[in-house]
Image: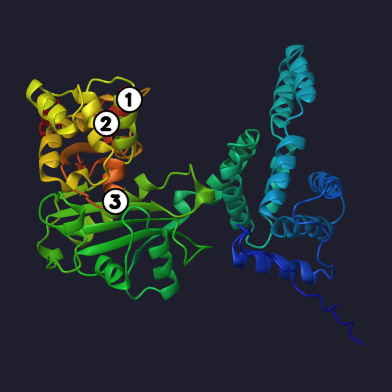
Amino acid sequence: MKKKKPNISQPEIDLSIAGISRKTIDKIVTAWKESGNPPPKIHPDMLPEDEKNLMNLMTECIMEEGGDISRQAKVVHLGMIYINLSQKGKGKFLRILARNFDVDTDLLDERIRKLRTAGNETERIEAELSLLDALIPPRVKLLRQLIKLPNGFIFLKDMRSDLIPMIKSIPRLKKLDTDIENLLSAYFDVNLLDLQEISWNSPASLLEKLMEYEKVHKILSWEDLKHRLFTDHRVFAFFHFRMPNDPLIFVEVALGNGMPGNIQKLLDVKAPANDPAESDTAIFYSISNTQKGLTGISYGNFLIKRVVQHLSEELPNLKTFATLSPIPGFYQWLYAYLQEGGDPLVTANESTKICNLSGKRNSREGLLEILKDEYWYRNTEKEKILKKPLMRLCAHYLINIKRGKKAFDPVAHFHLSNGAKIQNIHWMADISKKGISKSCGIMLNYHYRLNKIELNHESYLATGNVYASKDARSWLK
């Protein structure tokens, strides 16, 4: 008689705290049930006795004792433990992995001594290889085994999304984060990704994710989404073959003539559509990374270059490739700069008007006072008086303010490091609440001149040189 498999119910998982994707959880639970084992008995918050058992299991996994089936069962057991933990329990799990399975410094000292006392080339080579092996934390071997779980590299990606927010309170997790990022970099290499255009005919589940993931310019409705996918608007994304309906990163493009200077007009669903066949400009107006677990693994520069190539082949009439980009760090920098006594860069006439309008004794305090009102831009007089000072300060921020050699603004650094040039700075280009609070309503065009990209890229990375047009630099005068 054929022996029946035990009927084991799936353990209850609190999806509000489960960072691991539902599909991955289901696959791991299925693998565990097929092994005939009952659900792991472990408290979601991980009690002291649970921590001891976990360390023993991790050690057994690293030692790789027993046959293939036995070793795989232990790794699945580890996965089952993790997906059943609360946020507090996950923190303990990750802290144990980071602290108890780090590099053995005593072993390192021993290997270094052997290298220093090596008598000949053969001994030196063996000592160097031995030292390299000792530099790899034992947890890396465990992480590599977790990849063997069903959807293992996705499990690792989702685990990292749990880990990243914890680094600030548990600094030691930074080293573990680096180990996971290095492994994921290979499994999510850009050469393994497919460029696809997302259309209105794409699966509904994918379209819903697009609406969820868009953080730069929120998609307000299905009508808004349809507008971004039709006629003169396109959306392109990178997909991994193991995640066919979940983009890793996507970019939104508008086709038209000339460089636009207002995002609300660009996204207006009632605006007449341009004919792509007669358009001469492609504007990248939003780029969004979707996977927190892949933070630090850059795809944006590859995506833009691939889309430029694709559009150039499809629409040879396109001659200009540029962006309409936010300046997300400007307002925060400006407020801190003025509070710390920074020069507001105003003329005498501008200073008088700002002081009269704000009731303050100097233009620096006056600017701070006016900007406290989140609706200052709706006042015609305030908007008119602040235009030149804020545009001048914004140009100074973009071109002169640096972190080392890098542009201080993260979006500026991204585009400049990709070889773009600061072309036009636009006043009141984004009057959404986010646009005002982050950028004082200012946006700009980064211009990707195909024959200058490589030169600009090399120059910026080597010297920090910011390529900006005469029009952009004119605000500094």
CB atoms of marks 3 and 1 within 8 Å: no
Residue lying at the far right of the rendered structure: 1
Indicate the amino acid at tag 1. Answer: Gln
Place of residue 306 in the rendered image (x, y in percent of width and height, measured from the top left): 32, 52
Mark 1: secondary structure: helix
Residue at figure coordinates x 28%, y 38% from the top left: 372
Question: Is residue 107 or residue 359 the one in the foreground?
Answer: 359
Question: Is residue 379 or residue 82 the one in the foreground?
Answer: 379
Determine which residue is flagged by label 3.
433
Looking at the image, is mark 2 or mark 3 earlier in the sequence? 2
Indicate the amino acid at tag 3. Answer: Lys
- Given this view, does label 2 or label 3 mark the residue nearer the observer? 2
Determine which residue is flagged by label 1.
339
Place of residue 387 in the rendered image (x, y in percent of width and height, measured from the top left): 13, 37
Place of residue 137 in the rendered image (x, y in percent of width and height, measured from the top left): 71, 35
Determine which residue is flagged by label 2.
368
Indicate the amino acid at tag 2. Answer: Leu
Q: Quadrant of the C terminus?
A: top left
On screen, 123 above or below 156? above
Residue at figure coordinates x 14%, y 41% from the top left: 383
Residue 476, visible in the rendered structure:
yes
Looking at the image, is mark 2 or mark 1 earlier in the sequence? 1
